[in-house]
Amino acid sequence: MKDKKDIRALSKDQLRDFFIANGDKAFRGNQVYEWLWNKGAHSFESMTNVSKDTRKMLEEHFVINHIEVDKMQQSSDGTVKNAIKLHDSLIVESVMIPSQKRSTACVSSQVGCSLNCTFCATARLKRMRNLNPDEIYDQVVSIDQQSRLFEGHPLTNIVFMGMGEPLLNYDNVMKAIDMIISDEGLGMSPRRITLSTVGLPKMIKQLADDEVKFNLAVSLHSAIDEVRSKMMPVNKSHNLTELLESLKYWYSKTSKRITFEYVVWKGINDKKKDIDALVEYCKRVPSKVNLIEYNAIDNGDFQQADPKAIEYYVRELERNDITVNVRRSRGKDIDAACGQLANKSS
């Protein structure tokens, strides 16, 4: 028999059509759809309000390619890292980051990455494939369950800052987010979702044209082309001027200010000229800055900046009325912090 189709690749209408074509009622498709998404069923057998004959028919035609948490590690600070096994045995990682009354899911969108940012461990992995919408969705579901178990409350926030570049898996990421915010899925507010990108101008404009309601973050790390291109090869083909144009377009369409993710490294972007360049860049589009603590990946080229450099950044940004937050990394002891996801657990 030919390979069975993953049932979650079907829309609700396609499921309804399947049941009609097989002599059943259309509403059966609604029932199964709810089991697959809202109730997170891992098997047809668990669909208790569906008859045994119907479950057998589904088993004959379809599979549910559900993810498995292959390995879970918990940090001393409460952060949880999951090695996620996909149906084809490839591994990605996701992270739950708890803080007071919040829990944030950091999810992956690709197996590996193709962008070669020199400071990121994921960049050392070959990009194998894009994740399907259900594989992205499942990461969020599993972290929601972990938040309820370990923190006593549901997941509150989602960031697409795991493995891969979300905008290079545009359609699947958008479908996953649609299901995450849908009442038929998790019913989360899009305002609690942030998509982080290296800055692909064409795709940022596409987001704006698609009138998305979630937040946008850009991994900037330098507002000087020469410096940024050395760290992030993507800047050679999409420079800061082109990026800025797309971000202005984003703001004109969404009225949402951009978050710039920015790591300060010793001897790389910790000088006055670097700070002045960032201030000027931020003035040109409504934005705020997250200064992120660097997490070593066994790369001697990058070292955490002196605290005085961070203080100088904060002082200058605040002096120019630019909102700035200093993000202390979580989960470093289990390689779960920003830039460290590299399947070491596999």
Image (cartoon, grey):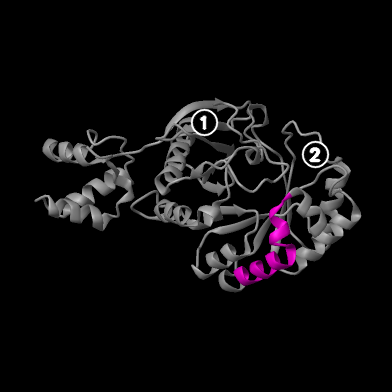
Q: Is residue 231 above or below residue 252?
A: above
Quadrant containing the C terminus in the rendered view? top right
Q: Secondary structure at mark 2?
A: loop
Q: Is residue 105 above or below residue 322?
A: above
Circle 1: residue type: Ala
Q: Earlier in the sequence, mark 1 or mark 2?
A: 1
Q: Horizontal and vertical percent for residue 121?
A: 66, 37
Circle 2: residue type: Phe
Q: Residue furthest right?
A: 272
Looking at the image, which is closer to me, 22 or 151? 22
Looking at the image, which is closer to me, 81 or 122? 122
Q: Horizontal and vertical percent for residue 9?
A: 33, 49
In-image side of 25 versus 70 (left or right): left
Magenta region, residue range: 232-251
Looking at the image, which is closer to me, 119 or 12? 119
Name the residue: 58% across, 68% down: 205
The residue to which callout 2 is attached is 302
Residue at mark 1 to residue at mark 2: CA–CA distance:
26 Å
Quadrant containing the N terminus in the rendered view? top left
The residue to which callout 1 is attached is 83
Q: Main secondary structure of the magenta part?
A: helix
